[in-house]
Amino acid sequence: MITSTPARLAQAMAALTIGVMAAGPALAQPAANCTFLMPIGGSEPVVSKRIGRGRLLGRNNWNTDFIVDQPFSSYRFFFTATSTDQASYPVQGFMRFTDETSLQLFNETMTPPQGTGRMWGPFASVPGKRTSLMNFRIGSSSEPGALGFSYRISVQGCN
């Protein structure tokens, strides 16, 4: 279903055009119906953060959980670097389940220039498991040069 907002209509048309160009008119598939997931404690689906220090006591800010409030067939993670400086740091994504288990979906060290975006996925739902959260983990105490680096992240669930 395509909503009537101009931005969403443009995104859907771009996805459909790319699919037609890549697969040819006879093999083109309609774009997936995707919804941005909301982060825990957030009011907007796109989270802006800055890599902070690790702590001896308390929690660091490396993890961001996105709530899965309905079943989806797949998930996509989005990242955009917003700092003017470059830094190297680990970026990981996890699918967490209601039985308290998790599945690591990706784990890589990135050095993205400002404005560079990246998408991971789509990652299919795990049969027989109910997904409760999608987790982005960005940062590590082993990469002190990345402190202060800023970025935006979001996650989509798709059917």
Image: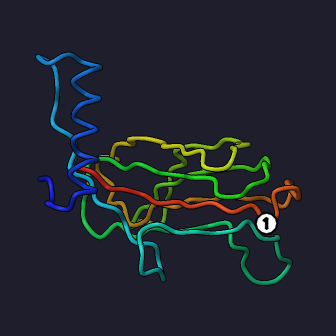
Q: In this rendered view, identify the residue nearer to me: 119 or 150.
A: 150
Q: In this rendered view, identify the residue nearer to me: 38 or 106.
A: 38
Q: In this rendered view, identify the residue nearer to me: 26 or 123.
A: 26
Q: Which residue is rendered at x = 81% and y = 57% of the image?
A: 146
Q: Percent x, y for residue 47?
A: 52, 69
Q: Which residue is mark 1?
A: 148
Q: Percent x, y for residue 21?
A: 26, 21
Q: Is residue 3 above or below residue 128?
A: below
User: In the drawing, does residue 79 fall left or right of residue 3?
Assistant: right
Q: Percent x, y for residue 149?
A: 75, 61
**Among the 4 quarters of the image, the one containing residue 111:** top right
User: In the drawing, does residue 113 fall left or right of residue 129?
Assistant: right
Q: Which residue is rendered at x = 11% and y = 16% of the image?
A: 26
Q: Which residue is rendered at x = 14% and y = 60% of the image?
A: 4
**Among the 4 quarters of the image, the one containing residue 13:** top left
Packing grade of label 1 (10 A; few <14, some 14-19, many >=20) is some
User: In the drawing, does residue 150 fall left or right of residue 29?
Assistant: right
Q: Which residue is rendered at x = 15% and y = 59% of the image?
A: 3
Mark 1 belongs to which amino acid? Gly
Q: In this rendered view, identify the residue nearer to me: 56 or 120.
A: 120
Q: Is residue 60 above or below residue 91?
A: below
How is this picture coloured?
rainbow
**Among the 4 quarters of the image, the one containing residue 140:** bottom right
Find the residue positioned furthest to the front.
6
Which SS class for mark 1? loop
Q: Percent x, y for residue 152?
A: 56, 61
Q: How many marks?
A: 1
